Amino acid sequence: MANQGATRPNRPNTGNKMCQFKLVLLGEFAVGKSSLVLRSVKGEFHEFQESTIGVKFEIWNTAGQEWYHSLAPMYYQGAQAAIVVYDITNEGSFARAKHRVKELQWQTTPNIVISLSGNKADIVNKRAVDVQEAQSYVDGNGLLFMETSAKASMDVNEKFMAIAKNLPKDKPENPGTNMARERGVDLTDPAQPARSQCCSH
Ligand code: GTP
Ligand code: MG
C-alpha cells in the first residue's frame, strides 16, 4: 500500500502524528465507487501538506454486484468509516444504499462514521433522487451527506475531509489487514489541532 505521507518530498518534519483508519466503500454496481477513489487519490490531497494532523485512509473498494453482498460482513469488519454511494440518476440505487446503511448500522461499531454520497451530480437533466429527500433521510439517521461528481471533481475531496473531521482521532483502532486494498490515502487537515494521544505510523 502506498504511504504517500512518508515518501512525499518537501514535507516538513513537524513531528506530527498520523492516524490510520479503515474506510469501506459500498454501493450498487456502477454508481461510481471506483471513480470516486480514483478522483480522490489523483486529486487535491497534496495541497494539504503542512498540516498538524495527518489522517491516512485505508480504502477498501469493492464491486457492487449483488453476489458480493454475502461477503459484506467480512468487508465491514474493523471499519471506522464508510461511504455509501448511490447514483442520483438511479432511484433504485438510492433505495439499495439505504439498505447498506442499515446493514452497517447493525453490523459495525456504533461510532462508525457513515457518509452517504449522491454521485453523478453532474448529470443534472437525469436526476431521479431529490436532494431534499436524501437530506431528510440523512438527517433522520445521523449520517454525513454530500452530492458528488467524480467526473466533474465536485465535492469528492470535501467528502473525505468531512469524514476525517468526524473520526475520533484520540481513540484510534487498527484497521484490518488481511484483504486486498485499493489504495492508502493521506489526508491532512490544517483546521485540526494536534492531539498527543493520536496514533503514530
Ligand atoms: P462497480 O465496481 O461495478 O460496482 O462500479 P463502481 O461503483 O465502481 O462504478 P465506476 O466507478 O466503475 O463507474 C461506473 C460508470 O459511471 C463509469 O462509466 C464511470 O465513468 C461513470 N461515472 C462514475 N462517476 C461518475 C460521475 O460522477 N459522473 C458521471 N457522469 N459518470 C460517472
Ligand atoms: Mg468499482
Image (spheres, rainbow, N blue to C red):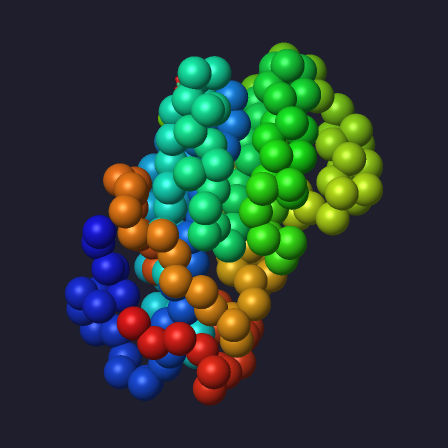
Of 180 and 124, nearer the camera is: 180
Q: Is residue 201 left or right of residue 120?
A: left
Q: Quadrant of residue 198?
A: bottom left
Number of numbered labels in the structure image: 0
User: Relative to residue 81, is residue 91 depicted above or below?
Assistant: above
Query: What's the residue at 32%, 85% (across, down)?
Result: 15
Tell me, yes or no, if residue 68 can be seen here. Answer: yes
Query: What's the residue at 34%, 76% (across, down)?
Result: 200
* Quadrant (top left/top right/bottom left/bottom right) for the C terminus: bottom left
User: Relative to residue 27, is residue 45 depicted above or below?
Assistant: below
The percent position of residue 66, horizontal first and vertical second, equals 47, 16
Q: Quadrant of ligand 2?
A: top left
Of 171 and 3, nearer the camera is: 171
Query: What's the residue at 58%, 42% (across, down)?
Result: 107
Q: Quadrant of residue 166?
A: bottom right
Q: Is residue 140 left or right of residue 158?
A: right
Tell me, yes or no, if residue 121 can be seen here. Answer: no
Q: Is residue 7 left or right of residue 78?
A: left
The percent position of residue 163, horizontal first and vertical second, equals 55, 55
The percent position of residue 45, horizontal first and vertical second, equals 38, 56
The percent position of residue 111, horizontal first and vertical second, equals 62, 57
User: Relative to residue 179, is residue 78 depicted above or below?
Assistant: below
Query: What's the residue at 22%, 68% (across, down)?
Result: 6
